[in-house]
Amino acid sequence: GNVTIRHSTITFNTANSDSNGTESGSGVFVTSTQSNVTLDHTIVAKNSRLGSASTRNDVSGPVVASSAFNLIGVDTGLTGISNGTNGNQIGTGASPIDPLIHNLADNGGPTPTHASRFDSPAIDAGHSGGAMTDQRGLPRPIEDPNTPNAASGDGSDIGACSMGTSTCVDGGAAASEPGRFGSARTSPIWLRLMSATPPTLSYVHIASNNTL
């Protein structure tokens, strides 16, 4: 049958049912019974066969050529699309793409999500494709003015969680490098403020000895 995966984040999964490391498609596995699998605006990265970076395996099998604005960590076993076409970012086994996302956490909304880091290649790299909200029910797209949009994109982030729709407190090195969502850095702190109407973004410095 036909399967479409849209505005999703598939990450940190392991396919190793028999413990020998021969499985494939730890993120998405396309079988012969699936005639058309489309990936759109989706992160599939940091999945593996043995739970280690050396055995990364994200998508196995063919996907529809029109699949667009995806971030796929490695192309091992993937056919149908290639890096640089239709806004797709696709790494290789020798040069994987790190999506730079945080662990599953409560970032607002009804379910836990993987928030993108401020420097993630998923930021402003997609297209909303008619979707008005992210997984949390918050608006998309909201553009980060510090990040150029992808060609033919509209400033939407790739993946389930749109970075630009929350107030983020995190350690950052400078105003031009604000942190967000659980960075290990603690000083100085920059408060990232995002307003949805109209979409605006600003940074406010908070001294490390202050509290919010």
Image: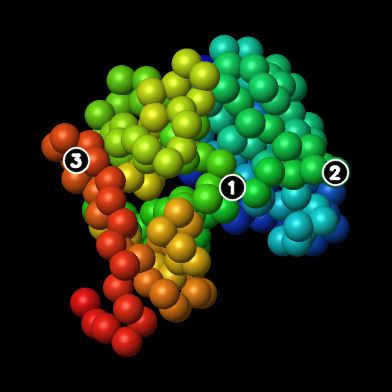
Q: Is residue 10 visible?
A: no
* Viewer-nearest residue: 188 or 92: 188
| Residue at 64% in and 37% down | 72
Q: Is residue 96 visible?
A: yes
Q: Which residue is mark 1?
A: 99
| Residue at 65% in and 49% down | 98
- The chosen color scheme is rainbow
Separation of marks 2 and 1 at Cα, in angstroms: 16 Å
Looking at the picture, how far across and down is residue 155, in whole percent?
A: 39, 29
Q: Which residue is mark 2?
A: 94
* Viewer-nearest residue: 75 or 48: 75
Judge whether 184 appears above or below 172 on screen. Answer: below
Looking at the picture, how far across and down is residue 54, in whole percent?
A: 82, 56
Judge whether 203 appears above or below 6 on screen. Answer: below
Q: What's under tag 1, amino acid-wise?
A: Pro
Judge whether 83 appears above or below 133 on screen. Answer: above
